Image (cartoon, rainbow, N blue to C red):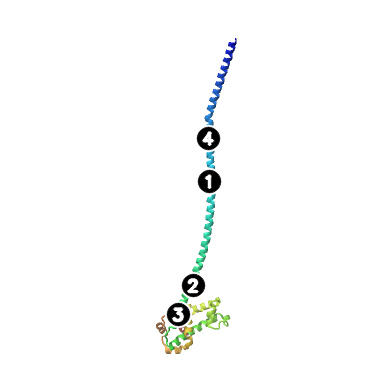
Amino acid sequence: MCKLLKASVLSDLSDRSRSNAQVAAACCRVENSRKPWVRTSIGFLFCFTLFALFCFKKMNTETTTLVSLTEAMERVDHKLQGLEAQFKELDITKDNLTQKFENHSKILASQAAQDELWTAVLALRFTSVELNILYSYVIEVLICLHTRVLEKLPDLRRSLPTFTSVLRRKVKNQRIRVAWESVLEEIGLQEGDAAALCAFFLAHGSEADHYAASVRRTYVRDVTFMITSMVKHWALRDGLLRAVQVVEKGKAARKP
């Protein structure tokens, strides 16, 4: 009896052991069947995390690069604006210097021309009679200029008593300057002619005498030829020739 009971118990335990072993094996199979999916999921999550970190880092790098590039462009733009302002200042300075240089060149050229004119006037080699004849034409033209300017400016007659006062005040007074230029044009003279006649008058006026037209014809029949052959400086020669023309035309105009 005892043997039968023992055998029954052992058989029952053996069955339970096999059943537990089967359950354990099944659990292992289930667990093993789940492990590849879990490993795949974990790998995917790991790769995704790495990719996300890479993208985030790249985005941060690109953002930093973009900000740096923007700042660099702003600095370059600021420098360009500064250079543009400097170039504008340089252009203004260049224009001012060019204008000053041109004005200075004109002044130097005018001074050189005046020096040449005065040298030519002082180098004239006329006899006293010839000098008096030329002086007579010159003084008559200068008187004509002064008289005609006063005719155009009757209200300024008292303030322009001499020819020198006209020359001095025409520089700053526009009315006098306009009247002066108008008179020169009317009688056929230019500014250079007037300057040459003034230089001749200042150089030889103190030592010359005025001859009337009848006396002039007695001494010299062709004053134009005398001037052309004796005066070599073109500005002085042209001024004296035009003075003779002005006087002769004025005398011819008064004939009946």
Q: Name the amino acid, label 3.
A: Leu
Mark 1 / mark 3, whichever is N-terminal? 1
- The residue mark sitting in front, 1 or 3, is 1
Determine which residue is flagged by label 2: 104
Mark 2 / mark 3, whichever is N-terminal? 2
Of 41 and 15, the residue lying toward us: 15
How far across and down, in percent of the image, does residue 221 sit?
41, 87
Mark 4 / mark 3, whichever is N-terminal? 4
- The residue mark sitting in front, 2 or 1, is 1
Judge whether 91 appears above or below 238 on screen: above
Q: Name the amino acid, label 1.
A: Thr
Q: Which mark is residue 44?
A: 4
Q: CA distance from mark 2 to mark 3?
A: 20 Å
How far across and down, in percent of the image, does residue 116 sit?
44, 79
Q: At x 50% / y 66%, what residue is drawn?
A: 95
Determine which residue is flagged by label 3: 117
Determine which residue is flagged by label 1: 61
Label 3 neighbourhood size at 10 Å, few (<14), some (14-19), many (20+)? many
How far across and down, in percent of the image, does residue 195 sit?
48, 80
Judge whether 48 appears above or below 193 on screen: above
- The residue mark sitting in front, 2 or 3, is 2
SS class, disc 1: helix
Judge whether 53 appears above or below 92 on screen: above
Q: CA distance from mark 1 to mark 3?
A: 82 Å
